[in-house]
Image (spheres, helix red, strand yellow):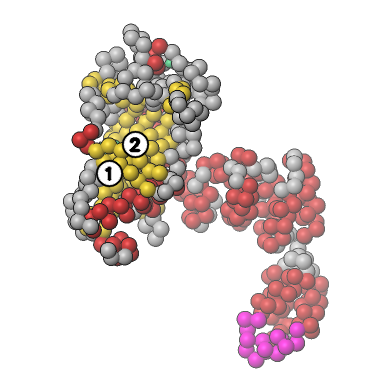
């Protein structure tokens, strides 16, 4: 077989995602039971979510509001009337014997989301439909060798399913799209984005075709991927599998697949011939879902700021470079912290905004990565960080000393302690701008390095950096670099 590189340029993968997101309503989709993830097993249940005969479901209006937010945020059309359907199948953790979902009339359809590509371009990924449905229970197989446990708490928990068009053509595009969906859900405050706890999961549909072909190849569908790494590894593995199959003269046949993260392989679980016939029919116990124009206008008016709007605002209001704005607003809580720092700045100006942004993007981010914590667990107060940013912008400490001060502040347990540390270390690192003092440092370093001075004078101008380094070191990072530069050049050119 030709090498994988050659094959990758011969074939084009086509990917479509089906994403299930749990809506963070307090109660379930069709009954009053709590949706709390941490409750003891089988405590949040009632005749409705267990499907006892005669028990009548009633739609949770908050679920409709939530899905409309997502639909409107992704430029979907909204159906004025839609219905629920029963999807019939047997599974031990589905006591009802059917799942309530939407089939032919999804409430939202025909939208899109834009993703950023590596080369600064954007690509529109179509959203075919977004519909409402309920989750099933959970089977737990790891406790006993000879039996399984069932927790019905999740029965009836509200989900939305977002189905994309087959518009993604690489693993990178697929993960970026999933990332964008997650970011949008979190910005809308309708889902917690937590893939580990299963509140966001995804099925990936994959086919390959010869580059340039218009017709889509036969797809397979990998079920239940629950982390970004799994999505990216599983999709890569499946693309490779399909290409090798075709190269060896065989055909890809429609299959439902599972992904095994241990050996990084996808394997077929059932083929189209064995596929379920779900016998969908309209759910007789629920009325039509009606959405008025006023309702849509009302949702639009309460829609929170979306990621792209936030980036735009950071660029226009705070004059941040757009790459910085993207980076800071990637995570909504992180952006929230940045905005608190901004609001604590005494002097509201571009330089302070940018410095605050820089400290967040580098120093704060590093702490979060090193300690594997989220911004909500970060202990330095916004006020102290604003103070630090202002000291850098005003020139009272250098950018390199800023890092030292930041690291010292990390030791403060309370706001008061942090403020004290900030004040003390600002004194300790306060930048020397006294030209007399700096000039004597410059002279000292030049005297100590006569060889380099000679080389500089006969044209090796890049040695300026060497001298600046030495001088800054000698001043323990306190010398004002701008003045150091000026005086160094003056003394060298004499
Ligand atoms: P099902 O409900 O049987 O999974 P759908 O028509 O809802 O079928 O499609 C599911 C997903 O498969 C969608 O995200 C769609 O974009 C994607 N898809 C459809 N055809 C292909 C294909 N040939 N290659 C890759 N993805 C595809
Ligand atoms: Mg599917
Ligand atoms: Zn219930």
Q: Is residue 262 above or below residue 68?
A: below
Residue at 42% x, 48% y: name it: 263
Does residue 5 show up magenta in the picture? Answer: no
Q: Which mark is residue 25?
A: none
Asked where in the image residue 378 lies, by quadrant, the reply is: top right
Residue at 77% x, 79% y: name it: 445
Q: Is residue 125 above or below residue 39?
A: below
Q: Which mark is residue 220?
A: 1
Asked where in the image residue 65 lies, by quadrant, the reply is: top left
Q: Nearer the viewer, residue 468 or 276?
A: 276
Question: Residue 312, can we see it?
Answer: yes
In the image: residue 292, left or right of residue 231: left
Q: Which residue is mark 2?
A: 162
Does residue 450 show up magenta in the picture? Answer: yes
* Image quadrant containing the C terminus: bottom right
Q: Where does the image place residue 133, in percent across and percent down from the top left?
A: 34, 26
Residue at 25% x, 62% y: name it: 10
Residue at 40% x, 40% y: name it: 225
Cα separation, mark 1 vs mark 2, equals: 18 Å
Q: Where does the image place residue 140, in percent across and percent down from the top left?
A: 46, 28
Question: Residue 349, can we see it?
Answer: no
- Residue range (magenta): 449-463
**Secondary structure at numbered mark 2:** strand
The verdict on label 1 being within 8 Å of ligand 1 is no
């Amino acid at each position: 077989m030709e090498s994988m590189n050659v094959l990758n340029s011969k074939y084009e993968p086509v990917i479509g995602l089906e994403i299930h997101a749990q809506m963070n309503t307090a109660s379930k989709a069709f009954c009053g039971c709590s949706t709390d993830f941490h409750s003891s097993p089988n405590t949040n249940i009632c005749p409705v979510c267990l499907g006892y005969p005669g028990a009548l479901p009633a739609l949770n209006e908050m679920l409709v509001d939530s899905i409309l937010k997502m639909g409107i945020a992704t430029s979907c059309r909204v159906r004025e009337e839609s219905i629920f359907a029963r999807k019939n199948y047997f599974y031990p953790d589905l006591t009802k014997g059917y799942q309530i979902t939407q089939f032919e009339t999804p409430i939202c359809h025909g939208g899109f989301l834009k993703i950023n590509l590596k080369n600064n371009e954007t690509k529109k990924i179509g959203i075919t439909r977004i519909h409402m449905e309920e989750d099933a229970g959970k089977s737990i197989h790891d406790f006993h060798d000879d039996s399984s446990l069932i927790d019905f708490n999740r029965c009836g928990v509200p989900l939305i399913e977002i189905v994309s068009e087959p518009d993604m053509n690489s693993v990178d595009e697929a993960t970026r799209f999933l990332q964008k969906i997650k970011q949008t859900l979190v910005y809308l405050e309708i889902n917690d984005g937590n893939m580990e706890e299963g509140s966001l999961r995804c099925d990936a549909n994959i086919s390959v075709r010869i580059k340039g072909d218009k017709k889509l190849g036969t797809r397979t569908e990998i079920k239940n991927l629950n982390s970004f790494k799994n999505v990216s590894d599983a999709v890569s593995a499946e693309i490779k599998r399909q290409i090798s199959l075709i190269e060896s003269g065989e055909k890809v046949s429609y299959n439902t697949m599972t992904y095994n993260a241990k050996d990084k392989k996808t394997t077929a679980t059932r083929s189209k011939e064995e596929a379920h016939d779900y016998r969908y029919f309209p759910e007789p116990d629920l009325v039509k879902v009606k959405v008025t124009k006023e309702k849509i206008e009302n949702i639009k008016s309460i829609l929170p700021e979306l990621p792209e709007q936030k980036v735009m605002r950071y660029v226009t209001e705070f004059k941040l470079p757009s790459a910085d704005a993207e980076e800071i607003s990637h995570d909504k809580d992180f952006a929230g912290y940045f905005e608190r720092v901004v609001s604590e700045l005494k002097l509201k100006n571009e330089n302070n905004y940018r410095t605050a942004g820089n400290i967040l993007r580098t120093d704060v981010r590093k702490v979060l990565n090193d300690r594997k914590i989220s911004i909500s667990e970060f202990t330095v107060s916004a006020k102290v960080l604003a103070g630090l940013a202002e000291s850098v912008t005003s020139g009272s400490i250098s950018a390199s000393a800023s890092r030292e001060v930041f690291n010292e502040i990390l030791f403060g347990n309370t706001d008061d302690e942090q403020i004290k540390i900030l004040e003390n270390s600002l004194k300790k690192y306060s930048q020397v701008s006294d030209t007399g003092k700096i000039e004597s440092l410059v002279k000292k370093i030049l005297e100590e390095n006569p060889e380099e001075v000679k080389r500089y004078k006969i044209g090796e101008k890049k040695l300026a950096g060497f001298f600046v380094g030495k001088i800054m070191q000698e001043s323990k990072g306190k010398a004002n670099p701008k003045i150091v530069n000026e005086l160094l050049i003056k003394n060298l050119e004499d």
